[in-house]
Amino acid sequence: MSKFKTTALRCLLALSISLATLVARGVSAAETVAPPSVAIHFTFDRPLDASMAPFFLAAKDGRFGAEHLNVSFGSASGSPEALARVAKGDSELALVDINELIRFRDKDDAAPVKAVFVLFNRAPYAIVARKSRGINVLPDLDGKTVGVADGDLSMRLWPALAQQNGIKTSHLKFHKISAAVREPILSAGQVDAVAGFSYLSAVNLRDRGVPGADLVVLRYADYGCEAYGFAVVANAAFAAAKPDAVKGFISALIAGIAATVKEPARAADEAASRIDGGDRDLELERLRTVLSDNILTDEVRRNGLGGIDPRRWERSVDQIALDFKFRKRPTVADIFDDRFLPPVAARLVN
């Protein structure tokens, strides 16, 4: 019995010393427990494709988990629907076209949704045409027929692009089509060109057997369009209540972008695995196009990922205003909140 008491006393003494050490270091027992994960439902504004690979690779590599986030993904039928989900709180974050966000916020009763990270430094708007129809540069569209899907975002900035390049829009015939037949109708020769995204239509057309040498991608950005592209937006209440969660999400996404740049083949594999009938080679080609044309621009290499240049912003709003009457012209701060971005050094791409 005496031996048992001695052992018990020694155990209590050892425990007391351990607790005293923790107190001396200013560490409480509660602080040694990891914080609970924050649930984030993230909505993409369109069907999945390889441009979303940085998000998927961040999830695959445990980057979100390392930031104590439990992230789930879903898709909407367009930027308006994705914005509505974030505004209502059905999704905490979403990826949408920032130019659609600008128009959304101009409504009288619009929820104060803001962008917190710009993924596409350059908008992917483009006209994809066939050289065999006599189209090599933008002015060659004069007198041609262009297929345009309902709600095509690129058409919102067409008036500004046409004006900048001296193109009379009355000389073009815009043929309304569904998005599902955009590529088939061009490959069949029923139109001379189609409006859309450079990394989608052009890659899809080559996959359909249209010779790459017969395709020309007339990127809006190459003809003076200053627009930014897809951006991560946040629910205002969530961002105010969980700022560290938003910061953690962005840090994880930046890590996902870095991993995608370093290992595009692995990133394409991960994206293709999440797409019904996904083709790894097709998605890899799409991913490489997105990285070079939309994400890793000269501006990003100078200033880092995720931000907005105020002077360029003003020029882009000028272009939107040619086809959209603002109730109140937005400032950068009205649309973009940079408080969640890490320092520039952490956003530079090697």
Image (tube, rainbow, N blue to C red):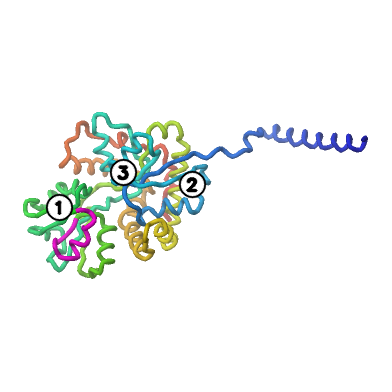
**What crowding class fits label 2: few (fewer than 14 Cα within 10 Å), some (14-19), or many (20 or more)?**
many
Residue 65's spot in the image, x, y percent? 52, 46
In the drawing, what numbered circle is on residue 42? none
Single out the mark in the foreground, 3 or 1: 1
Q: Residue at x 20, y 42 (%)?
A: 320
Q: Within the magenta stretch, is there residue 190?
A: yes
For the residue pair 134 and 278, the one nearer the viewer reads as 278
Dot 2 lies on which element? helix
Q: Is residue 276 left or right of residue 213?
A: right
Q: Which residue is mark 3?
A: 309
Q: Residue at x 84, y 37 (%)?
A: 10
CA–CA distance between discs 2 and 1? 41 Å
Residue 80 vs 206, above or below: the answer is: above
In the drawing, what numbered circle is on residue 64? 2
Name the kind of residue labelled 2 in the image: Phe
Of labels 2 and 3, earlier in sequence is: 2
Q: Residue at x 73, y 34 (%)?
A: 19
Report the residue that reaches farthest toward the right: 2
- Total numbered badges shown on the rendered structure: 3
Dot 1 lies on which element? strand
Single out the mark in the foreground, 2 or 1: 1
Residue 284 vs 169, above or below: the answer is: below
Q: Residue at x 88, y 34 (%)?
A: 5
CA–CA distance between discs 2 and 3? 28 Å
**Highlighted magenta segment, given as a residue range:** 178-194
Q: Which residue is mark 1?
A: 176
Name the kind of residue labelled 3 in the image: Asp
Q: Quadrant of the C terminus?
A: bottom left
Of labels 3 and 1, earlier in sequence is: 1
